[in-house]
Image: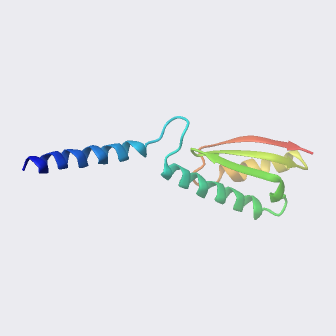
Amino acid sequence: MKYFKNYSVTIILLAMLFTLGCTTTATQESTGEYVDDSVITTRVKSAIFNEPTLSSAEINVETYKGVVQLSGFVSSQSDINKAATLARSTAGVQSVKNDMRTK
């Protein structure tokens, strides 16, 4: 019985350590957040790709904790505005940082 009690306490402590290891910090995403951000990035890239007036090869999209960052070079200010609007209208996007520049 004594071994069972020690064994149970050890298992509970290990479970707590593994659970705490999966939490998020201010500088690091959890696994779930990483997957969510990957989905958001894919959705934004798809929206930009499907817009015929935008050159999707010149626009970079990165997402961290729901914040989308757009960067790259486009031909006009209207292209910058259009890409930002598409990103903002994508499900899951909390905000957009627009670092795109005109050529």
Q: What residue sits 78% from the left and 62% below the top?
A: 51
Count of marks overlaid on the render: 0
Q: Position of residue 44 (x, y in %)?
A: 68, 56
Q: Residue at x 83, y 54 (%)?
A: 58
Quadrant in the rendering for residue 13: top left
Seen as rendered, the residue at the extreme top is 26
Say which residue appears at 86% left-offset and 45% top-offset. Answer: 77
Rendering coords of residue 22 (x, y %):
43, 46
The residue depicted at 37 percent of the width and 47 percent of the height is: 18
The colour scheme used to paint the residues is: rainbow
Would residue 64 appear left or right of 47 to someone viewing this image?
A: left
**Quick one: 54 or 2, which is closer to the camera?**
2
Answer yes or no: is residue 2 visible. yes
Which x, y percent locates residue 71?
Answer: 78, 45
User: Could you tell me which quadrant the C terminus lies in?
Assistant: top right
Q: Would residue 54 be seen by someone viewing this image from the given angle? A: no
State the residue lying farthest toward the front.
3
Whether residue 87 sits left or right of residue 66 in the image: it is right
- Residue in front for this viewpoint, 82 or 33: 33
Residue 50 position within the rendered picture, expressed as x and y whole percent measured from the top left: 76, 65
